Image: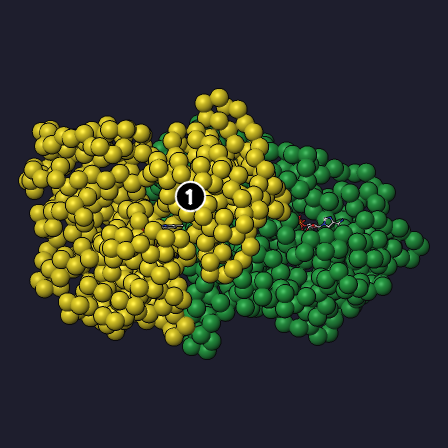
Chain colours: A yellow, B green
Amino acid sequence: MLTPDVLIIGAGPSGLSAGTELVKRGHRVLVVEREAVAGGIPRHCAHKGFGIRDLHRVLDGPTYATRLVAAAQRAGVTIWTTAMVTDWSASAGATITSPHGRFLVTPRATILATGARERPRAARLLPGDRPSGIYTTGQLQNSVHLHHQRVGSRAVILGAELVSFSAVLTMREVGCRTVAMVTEHPRPEAYAPVAKAGGLLFRFPVLVGHRVTRIIGRAQLEGIEIENLSTKQRRVIECDTLITSGDWVPDHELARLGGLAMDGRSKSPIVDGGLRTGSPGVFAIGNLVHPVDTGDVAALDGRHVVASVEQWLASMPPMPSTVQLIPAGVLTWVAPGRWGEFVARPSRGRYLGWVGGFARFPRVTVRQAGDVLATRRLPWPAVPGRLFRIPSSLLRDVTISGGDVTIEVK
Amino acid sequence: MPVLRDHDAVLPTRCDVAIIGAGLVGSALAQALSGLDCSVVLLEAKGDVGDATSKANTALLHTGFDATPGTLESRLVRRGYELLSAYARQTGIPVERVGAVLVAWSDEEFASLPTLREKAIANGYHDCALIDADEVYRRLPALGPRALGGLTVPDESLICTWTTSLALATDAVQRGTVLALNTTVTSAVVGAGETVLTTSRGSLVATWVVNAAGLGSDVIDQLFGYDRFTITPRRGELLVYDKLARQHVPHIVLPVPSSVGKGVLISPTIYGNVMLGPTAEDLRDRSDSATSESGIDFLLTKGAKIMPSLLEEEVTASYAGLRAASEHKDYVVDVDATQRYAVAGGIRSTGLTASMSIAEYLVAAIRDAGFVATEKTTLPPPPRMPNLGEESLRPFANEAAIAADPAYGEIVCFCERVTTGEIRDALSSVISATSLSGLRRRTRATNGRCQGFYCGADVLARLAIAVEGHS
Ligand SMILES: Cc1cc2nc3c(=O)[nH]c(=O)nc-3n(C[C@H](O)[C@H](O)[C@H](O)COP(=O)(O)OP(=O)(O)OC[C@H]3O[C@@H](n4cnc5c(N)ncnc54)[C@H](O)[C@@H]3O)c2cc1C
Ligand SMILES: Cc1cc2nc3c(=O)[nH]c(=O)nc-3n(C[C@H](O)[C@H](O)[C@H](O)COP(=O)(O)OP(=O)(O)OC[C@H]3O[C@@H](n4cnc5c(N)ncnc54)[C@H](O)[C@@H]3O)c2cc1C
């Protein structure tokens, strides 16, 4: 297994799904996972909401993770756990560190499926004391669901993305009351109905348009100071737990060590519609390329990538020519970030993007060489702090010789 | 080997020398004194060694090129550089000689470079060289625009301050020092031949008392009837950037020092990150190590000018340290033979480098003042410390180590590549970790870019098992 057809780094929903599909088509696949158990982030999300688009059922995270792992194993995927890729480049291969030793794996194709994480307190530059009691949702759920550790009794949740509501659910399970949710954005980022239900159901205020200006508490968290962005007024909320939720950053260490072309805004490797990176034989899928979407969307990336991996394994074609997709208006990044003729249609026929401003009925305009190729008003809003989906049909008239394409959202 | 930690552990009733404070300076003193035939007790208010200013600094091993010539600090920094470099080689404290480039951004600063070079020579450091702007950019391609020239300091080095405190204190304990943690000294009564110290762990009779209490050194000094210096905590805030930023920063980037202090630098860290800071701001509260909005803004503004590309990278950590600044320009290092009392206080911003030379100097002074003790004939070898340096071989990358013990191949903290073997070792070492922060300083676990998103819960669980097993 040191020379598989395909090496997949990361056994989350995307990596596992890609592995299963590729093995079913007769390729030798090795999936390596640094955690002791495969499954990725869903392993510790105990609530329901997984598997809808890929498995067509509503599962909780651990069940979803277990099913994906079982499916991969049944299909014949080799999965190494407690095996971390500590060094990688397309030409030299992957160095794997494990209790069994260090191994150099030199595959014919490599899929990076390393996922994304939430920005912790320091990365958000929150000033103040440095007490305990501050967690990302990831650490919170790891603590509660995998290690049965205790958290405090009064929590403030920073961020109002979908994952933030997931944090509220976890808190409720362990008897920790959420006293407020705080977000800089003028509206909760999560889907309005969830947010509304969340607010009503859990009875805590969602403080939009606020930022955290100080962390208070020497040993244990005692409170946070927040500022109303429009009035500049500040006040202190007492709490012993702060969850810094959402605000995702891809786990792009290997992508950058390997010198892949990166998107400066999403900090993800740039891929085309076939999920090919700028380096031949290297593919990137899941939340690594779009921080972040739901697990099922990541899993479907794992199926979508199969076509280009197989094309590579069959004929090792030279890098296809592609054109760059340039975000404009409120759009800050878009993935895939390049368009090519081979697999022109991205996974699920959607481009995924991130917006810097709110638009209730956003107008999307696609231009190439100054010509408007398509323009359409979408019925769903563009909301900062949550992925924005752009139908790929808007890019139907893009041509490979036409030069860079701008996608404007207003 | 006696490390007193729990509430019911009892202090020895008497000793030849009691040292107050187990920062770098107190630990170095204990290491030196316990090389003599005498009994030493090292008293520390906190639950760990090196847990105050000694843990939160910029961790540079200074050549002393920019000290004030003729001061004790100038002399001891030079000597400390040599002593600590040699000790680091013996014990495995990681050191990286990356060198510094001091960059001039204005005509005035540019004009001062030759003077700085002369000052370096006056401080006994001869290897500084003036370089023009092209050469500055050749060495530091990521530097922001409009640098006019620079001065190189090839021997400025990175060191691990955490491992240094631990190595010195471990060495001291192995040489027979009794380390009393969670032990605060509250009063001193000087008698004819001995001094009675009252501590939170009961009283202790000592022939000699050495004050290495850092931010509390003036308070201890007053217990001996002095009123010669007052400590003002001068806060230094720092931002630590992601390891992926390290490629931008091959050398330490220094500013031209001003009357206010050494200024804001950008430096690689021994752990493979990049550091931006420190600020310099006088505070009142000696225990306030919070970061501030204004401090962070100030650093971002400075950083944007010095190296704009750095600010595109993710911030991994932010912290603040308090320099023990006094009204004097120099260290307060003195011996009072009558009271059999010595002080090493006001060790502001070079005490990591000078820790061993301060100890060497003060021990000689104490012996001159009548303290009689001969060198021990046999000493245990100095400890071999676990390597936290990114550039030297770490367990996860060491095939032989993994083959001998698979726990060194089992990575728990992915960002910092810390293995279960290292965590186990830190939880069972001579001065073992009993808190998350203690474990972080011994292994780097959870110090990385995810700050515990992946491994925080696992690391805490391992700590809890070890600590509960202990008590
Ligand atoms: C709190 C929370 C709640 C969520 N709730 C939902 C929900 O209700 N429904 C839903 O559909 N989605 C939900 N999600 C999102 C979902 O979990 C993700 O979309 C999904 O896990 C992404 O899959 P992935 O394969 O891209 O990455 P991940 O699941 O993150 O997997 C990446 C894997 O790669 C491994 N890896 C990384 N680097 C290396 C390396 N160098 N060597 C070896 N292995 C490596 C990691 O250990 C990890 O296991 C939630 C996420 C969170 C955090
Ligand atoms: C921002 C910053 C950057 C710096 N950068 C560098 C650098 O790059 N290179 C360098 O060489 N130096 C640097 N320094 C300086 C260096 O960190 C200090 O000089 C050094 O740590 C001082 O060590 P210490 O042992 O004197 O003090 P401390 O580390 O403060 O130790 C004193 C100890 O005494 C204990 N104590 C106090 N009162 C009592 C009591 N009553 N009873 C019992 N125990 C007591 C305290 O708990 C503490 O542990 C920097 C400092 C700062 C703040």
Q: Quadrant of residue B302?
A: top left
Q: Which quarter of the image is occupied by the C terminus of chain A?
A: top left
| Disc 1: host chain | A
Q: Is residue B181 visible?
A: yes
Q: Position of residue B324 (x, y in %)?
A: 67, 42
Q: Amino acid at mark 1?
A: Ser
Q: Position of residue B128 (x, y in %)?
A: 48, 45
Structural crowding at the residue carrying mark 1, measured as other residues with C-alpha within 10 Å and reported as few (<14), some (14–19) or many (≥20):
many
Frontmost residue, B372 versus A49: A49
Q: Position of residue A130 (x, y in %)?
A: 57, 44
Instruction: Name the residue located 9 percent from the left edge and 51 percent from the top edge.
Output: A342
Point out the residue furthest to the bottom here: B404
Q: Position of residue A8 (x, y in %)?
A: 26, 62
Left or right: residue B229 compared with residue A139: right
Give the total number of marks visible in the rendering: 1
Left or right: residue B345 compared with residue B69: right
Frontmost residue, B460 versus B3: B460
Q: Quadrant of residue A362?
A: top left
Left or right: residue A10 compared with residue A282: right
Instruction: Name the residue located 11 percent from the left edge and 47 percent from the top edge.
Output: A344
Instruction: Name the residue located 81 percent from the left edge and 49 percent from the top edge.
Output: B186
Instruction: Name the residue located 34 percent from the left edge and 64 percent from the top edge.
Output: A66
Q: Which quarter of the image is occupied by the N terminus of chain A?
A: bottom left
Frontmost residue, A229 versus B265: A229
- Is A387 located above or below residue A142 in the figure? above
Point out the residue furthest to the front here: A201
Q: Is residue B251 visible?
A: no
Dot 1 corresponds to which residue? Answer: A164
